[in-house]
Image (tube, rainbow, N blue to C red):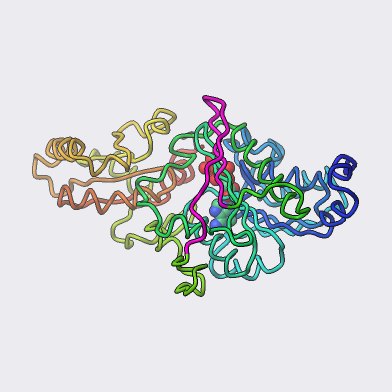
Amino acid sequence: MYLITWRLFSFPGQKRLKKASVLVVGCGGLGCPAAQYMAGCGIGRIGLVDYDVVELSNLHRQLLHSEFNLGVPKVTSLAQALLRLNSSLKIDEYNVQLSSANALEIFAKYDIIVDASDNVATRYLVNDAAVLSGRPLVSGGAVGCEGQLTVYNYKDGPCYRCLFPEPPPPETVSNCSDVGVVGPVPGCIGVLQALQVIHIITEKGEVASGKLLLFDGVSFTFRSIRLRGKSPTCKICGSEPTITQLMDYEQFCGLPANDKDSGLNILDASERVSPVFLEQAIAKKLPLLLIDVRSPVEFEMCRLPESTNIPLKLLNKEETVDRLKEMWATVAGNQNAESRVYLVCRRGNDSQLGVRRVQNILKCQVFDVKGGLHAWSRDVDPSFPIY
Ligand SMILES: Nc1ncnc2c1ncn2[C@@H]1O[C@H](COP(=O)(O)OP(=O)(O)OP(=O)(O)O)[C@@H](O)[C@H]1O
């Protein structure tokens, strides 16, 4: 298995690979192919971090997981696949959410970090932890049919914060669940992340530091663009850093805490209802406006019959404000004191963000459905499809 690597990189290069250790954050669409090729080329130790379990909807792009492992932690499922490929590999499994509390301790055990996660808060966390622990960071991303890759914090190159000192507003961020992702795209970027890891370890090929590789799967083109260099005023890697320890990244990015199932924390309990409560309100025919804030694509896939789709990103738009007011007028017009607005989404995170906006627009009682449609499927209607 290692022969090809050996011929290209020579015996000392192969020994370096064997001695190296790499941490992969995220065992999904990018993490699976990245880890697979790292295991194949003979990297000695791989750490895997993920707090999720394998779901059916993952399998079109996370190809080392399988139907046999539905419900199994992703780190375990991926570790099994990698060991089938290379039994001499050492694997450390971290079935946890990477957070400010554990990142530095985990990063200290590895030479190189691979960011294969899928959200902005984790990207800042991984960047900051990589800078503070002095590790190069191989970063990849894929949404829709587009992918990108770069290497941060390598020698004198920039870090993520040099280029993006502040996070984008949450409503402008597209993720895979908004627009989907075409499986081979993260597959391709993950494989290239593995190649960058090999280049860093063997010091043979070009490292994409200060460069961004862009892949467009529709026009089928690769482009490499030069990025700004290291920023002398960067808050974490500049000459006078003001960030010297990890922070609360969900808060920094203006996001609800990343609790996948309960999605708690930016609203207090009185602004949230359970799916069972909503079901009873519907059954009693109480006057209500139920807004589903997911993307139209997701709304098409499955929805509650009483719901209307207004994606989170559109909630503040002028035409939506008018539409919202009209819809609310038809519900609240009869002055029934029990009239309510409920917001729902996939897991109960985006709906929390929407509550404040709708409260400001309609000046009425607006509630978030805790845990979203996942919790509806779990607690009210098991036949409701989850994805
Ligand atoms: N802070 C974190 N700690 C641990 N794992 C993380 C963290 N942030 C993201 N991840 C993991 O990174 C992986 C990213 O994989 P991918 O982009 O394919 O998305 P996914 O969450 O599996 O897909 P879907 O959105 O369809 O459920 C996920 O398995 C996710 O659990």
Q: Quadrant of residue 284?
A: top left
Residue 123, how many percent across, how many down?
52, 55
Left or right: 106 as drawn, with respect to 273: right
Left or right: 16 as drawn, with respect to 260: right
Left or right: 303 as drawn, with respect to 151: left
Q: Which residues are magenta?
A: 210-231
Residue 83, how many percent across, how many down?
82, 48
Residue 337, how many percent across, how many down?
13, 49
Left or right: 83 as drawn, with respect to 351: right
Considering the image in quadrants, where does the N terminus appear?
Answer: top right
Residue 65, how many percent across, how many down?
69, 40
Q: Is residue 378 above or below residue 18?
A: above
Q: Decide whether residue 120 is among the magenta residues.
A: no
Q: Is residue 132 above or below residue 190?
A: below
Of residue 47 and residue 34, the one placed in the foreground of this image is 34
Of residue 287 and residue 126, the one placed in the foreground of this image is 126
Q: Residue at x 56, y 39 (%)?
A: 224
Of residue 8 and residue 262, the one placed in the foreground of this image is 8
Q: Quadrant of residue 281?
A: top left
Q: Residue at x 66, y 48 (%)?
A: 74
Q: Decide whether residue 230 is among the magenta residues.
A: yes
Q: Is residue 349 above or below residue 247?
A: above
